[in-house]
């Protein structure tokens, strides 16, 4: 993982060692798959091997490092809105989304349907939405982005048609990122 100074493109920080793939942050990283800046400047690093999530200061000090519970292939972990927990998507089929407490390793919320319209196919990003606490999920191989009601675990909003690839309005082709309008009332937009 590299941190580059945008002023002169110089390398400010390097975590991990090319050619080494072990979980010994920050010197070595086991297939890093996400680097999320936190409000205080720390970086949340996601490693695929053994589903490690680590919080590392800009100075390279590991604040904590834990395995994400019930996750096979973690993709881009993020802090929850309050900054106290971690939300991570499982890039798998069927996929899942887990929110857990990094201090205890305990799952506090999970979305993992195994049948029906809610089944995830290699979800890559999950984010907790402010205000409602509902969960936005990028569902890559289902070619959609959804919002799941936090309490009922029902899909309350969707963009893209499930399993239908496309490049025209209303369709997506392997979405792998999302910019969020954090001020949107998702339930009102869905007519609920």
Image: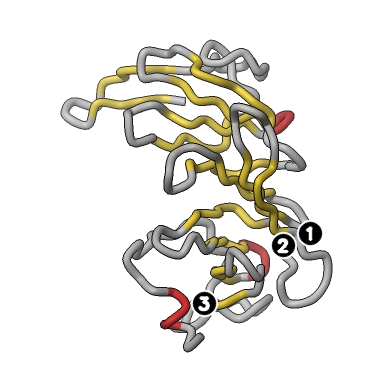
Which of the two labelled residues, at mark 3 and mark 2, occupies the earlier sequence position? 2
What is the secondary structure assignment of the residue under circle 1? loop
Dot 3 crowding, Cα within 10 Å, few <14, some 14–19, many 20+ = some
Q: Is 83 located above or below residue 17 in the figure?
A: below
Q: Distance between the residues labelled 3 and 1?
A: 20 Å
User: Residue, x 30% and y 18% (percent of image)?
Assistant: 12
User: Residue, x 71% and y 71% (percent of image)?
Assistant: 118
Taking the image as shown, residue 96 lies to the left or right of residue 25, namely right
Residue ID for mark 1: 94
Dot 1 crowding, Cα within 10 Å, few <14, some 14–19, many 20+ = some
Which of the two labelled residues, at mark 1 and mark 2, occupies the earlier sequence position? 1
Give the total number of marks visible in the rendering.
3
Q: Where is residue 142 in the image (x, y as percent from the top left)?
A: 66, 69
Name the quadrant containing residue 114.
bottom right
User: Residue, x 55% and y 20% (percent of image)?
Assistant: 64
Residue ID for mark 2: 121
Which is more toward the observer, 186 or 145? Answer: 186
Q: Distance between the residues labelled 1 and 2?
A: 6 Å
Residue ID for mark 3: 159
Name the quadrant containing residue 102.
top right
Q: Distance between the residues labelled 3 and 2?
A: 15 Å
Q: Is 168 located above or below residue 106 in the figure?
A: below
Which of the two labelled residues, at mark 3 and mark 1, occupies the earlier sequence position? 1
What is the secondary structure assignment of the residue under circle 2? loop
Q: Where is residue 176 in the image (x, y as percent from the top left)?
A: 53, 57
Q: Are marks 1 and 2 in contact (CB under 8 Å)?
A: yes
């Amino acid at each position: 993982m590299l941190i580059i100074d945008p002023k002169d493109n110089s390398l400010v920080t390097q975590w991990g060692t090319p050619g080494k793939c072990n979980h010994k942050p920050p010197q070595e990283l086991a297939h890093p798959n996400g680097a999320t800046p936190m409000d205080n400047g720390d970086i949340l690093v996601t490693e695929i091997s053994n589903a490690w999530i680590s919080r590392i200061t800009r100075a390279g000090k590991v604040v904590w490092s834990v395995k994400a519970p019930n996750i096979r292939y973690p993709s881009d972990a993020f802090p929850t809105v309050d900054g106290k927990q971690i939300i991570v998507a499982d890039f798998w089929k069927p996929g899942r989304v887990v929110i857990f407490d990094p201090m205890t390793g305990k799952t506090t919320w999970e979305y993992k349907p195994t049948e029906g319209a809610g089944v995830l196919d290699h979800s890559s990003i999950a984010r907790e939405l402010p205000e409602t606490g509902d969960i936005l999920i990028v569902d890559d191989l289902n070619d959609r982005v959804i919002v799941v009601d936090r309490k009922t675990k029902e899909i309350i909003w969707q963009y893209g048609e499930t399993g239908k690839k496309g490049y025209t309005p209303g369709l997506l082709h392997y979405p792998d990122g999302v910019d969020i309008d954090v001020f949107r009332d998702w339930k009102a937009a869905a007519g609920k």
